[in-house]
Image (cartoon, rainbow, N blue to C red):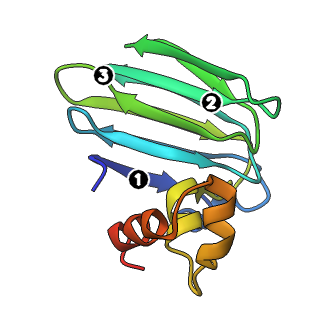
Amino acid sequence: MFGWSVTAANVLAFPGLNTLGISMNRVDFAPGGLNPPHSHPRASETGVVIKGKLLVGFVTTSNVFHSKVLTEGQMFVVPRGLVHFQINVGKGKALLFTAFNSQLPGSAVAATTLFASKPSIPNEVLTKAFQVDDDVIKNIKSKFGS
């Protein structure tokens, strides 16, 4: 759907990481691929671009957006719990390795959390939160199989 895939190296994949407080991910991006806005409730994240060109961004708790286009060898940091994303803005594939200060950082993808939860968040809550009509919320939920 978004043109990216992740290979996680956390305590679920490698039980030997138990109690070590570290984990990593390999993230592969197709051209135009997006790791959608998400957060990690239990870890800060660092990442290094191995191949390609990625726009990396996050939003602070003061609603300040920070972003930068990164190329091979460049790194980024995202503090724990902040909403962030990466998108491939290069012409070819991109590869990113990320590291976390938790054996199981967790991931909450904003769109699926809000529009594909089971049971579903009431439309009334989402229409008020986003200041849109019910038809807009129904349309978005339909994209996520809700």
Gap between marks 3 and 1 measured at Cα: 21 Å
Looking at the rendered structure, the secondary structure element under dot 3 is: loop
Q: Dividing the picture into quarters, in which one does residue 35 lie?
A: top left
- Residue 105 image point, x, y percent: 68, 54
Q: Residue 89 shows which numbered tag?
A: 3
Question: Which is more N-terminal, label 1 or label 3?
Answer: 1
Question: Which is more N-terminal, label 1 or label 2?
Answer: 1
Is there a contact, CB below 8 Å, between mark 2 and mark 1?
Answer: no
Q: Residues within 10 Å of mark 3 (few under 14, many from 20)?
A: many
> Which residue is located at x 59 percent, y 87 percent?
119
Q: Foreground: 83 or 44?
A: 83
Q: Foreground: 19 or 139?
A: 139
Q: Three-letter amino acid code at disc 1? A: Thr
On the image, numbered disc 1 is attached to which residue? 7
Judge from the rendering whether residue 80 lies leftward or rightward of residue 100; answer left or right: right
User: Residue farthest to the bottom?
Assistant: 119
Q: Quadrant of the C terminus?
A: bottom left
- Which tag is nearer the camera, tag 3 or tag 1? 3
User: Residue farthest to the front?
Assistant: 133
Is there a contact, CB below 8 Å, between mark 3 and mark 1?
Answer: no
Gap between marks 2 and 1 measured at Cα: 22 Å
Q: Three-letter amino acid code at disc 2? A: Phe
On the image, numbered disc 2 is attached to which residue? 58
Q: Three-letter amino acid code at disc 3? A: Val
